[in-house]
Image: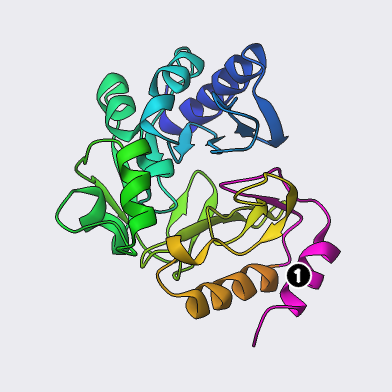
């Protein structure tokens, strides 16, 4: 069997297992895993056989259970914050798969630099949710490809933050460049990431505008439910400070 035969069969295996596990199907070969916490608190996605983000350290067991019969090739992060890298080490070691991380966040992921911004809020998040540091096997750059999605550098929240975008159906997985729930009340709605967790708000606003310029059809957030109403996104961006 050659490599071109292998990919469709593996994707079919992933799709079958995901359906059995009741994962939420978002688009072709894109699923949202079930949350251990309330829905859409810390979102984790599966695109083909790649896990996007890894929630908190408390989610490792739940994620590994959901992924037990699903082929995985790697974990790819949107950025290195405690609620996105928490279960990375346990998943990568248990499944013997590599970690891909945006270049600008590698030092934080590997423990050679602190997570940023260096605020009290981040330090508290680390105490409550962060997982161990872990070596990165693949450095992600603007324009790279992950399972049919283009890597787009969207800095501001962190230096290396990226989102993943698939041209064929315009699905965007945007990490924390924007969120679709209030960080305290949980009420659904579009919000910038909180300033205490964001290194450079002005740069992050430029990244939000970069997202809008892609004209996505579905936006998948690190926090909050998916968004299908792009007019709502346009209205939100129009109100952002220039």
**What percent of the width, then of the height, locates residue 43?**
56, 38
At horizontal 62% and vertical 29% (from top left) the residue drawn is 38
Residue 143 visible = no
Q: Quadrant of residue 68?
A: top left
Q: Residue furthest bottom?
A: 242
Task: Categorize mark 1 by other alpha carbons within 10 Å: few (<14), some (14-19), many (20+).
Answer: some
**What percent of the width, then of the height, locates residue 61?**
40, 17
63 left or right, relative to 233 = left
Q: Which residue is mark 1?
A: 236
**Placement of 94 over or under 212, stated as above or below:** above
In this view, the residue in front, 241 or 124, is 124
Residue 18 visible = yes
At horizontal 36% and vertical 30% (from top left) the residue drawn is 57
In this view, the residue in front, 192 or 14, is 192
**Placement of 160 over or under 65, stated as above or below:** below
117 left or right, relative to 205 = left
Q: What's drawn in magenta, residue-wise?
A: 215-242
**Placement of 225 over or under 64, stated as above or below:** below
In this view, the residue in front, 52 or 124, is 124
Q: Quadrant of the C terminus?
A: bottom right
The way the protein has been coloured in the rendering is: rainbow
Q: Quadrant of residue 217?
A: bottom right
At horizontal 32% and vertical 21% (from top left) the residue drawn is 95
**What percent of the width, then of the height, locates residue 102?**
35, 57
139 left or right, relative to 165 = left
In the rendered image, residue 13 lying in the magenta stretch gets the answer no
99 left or right, relative to 73 = left
């Amino acid at each position: 069997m050659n490599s071109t035969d292998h990919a469709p069969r593996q994707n079919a295996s992933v799709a079958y297992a995901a359906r059995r596990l009741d994962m939420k199907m978002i688009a072709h070969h894109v699923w949202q895993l079930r949350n251990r916490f309330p829905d859409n608190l810390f979102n984790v996605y599966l695109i083909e056989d790649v896990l996007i983000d890894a929630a908190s350290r408390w989610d490792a067991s739940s994620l590994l259970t959901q992924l037990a019969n699903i082929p995985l090739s790697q974990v790819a992060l949107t950025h290195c914050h405690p609620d996105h890298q928490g279960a990375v080490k346990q998943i990568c070691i248990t499944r013997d798969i590599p970690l891909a991380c945006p270049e600008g966040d590698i030092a934080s992921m590997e423990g050679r630099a602190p997570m940023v911004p260096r605020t009290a809020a981040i330090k508290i998040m680390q105490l409550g949710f962060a997982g161990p540091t872990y070596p990165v096997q693949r450095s992600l750059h603007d324009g790279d490809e992950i399972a049919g999605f283009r890597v787009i550098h969207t800095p501001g929240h962190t230096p290396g933050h990226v989102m993943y975008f698939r041209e064929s159906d315009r699905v965007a997985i945007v990490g924390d460049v924007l969120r679709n729930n209030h960080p305290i009340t949980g009420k659904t709605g579009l919000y910038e990431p909180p300033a205490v967790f964001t290194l450079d708000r002005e740069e992050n606003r430029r990244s939000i505008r970069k997202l809008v310029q892609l004209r996505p059809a579905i936006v998948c957030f690190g926090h909050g439910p998916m968004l299908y109403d792009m007019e709502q996104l346009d209205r939100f961006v129009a109100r952002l400070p220039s």
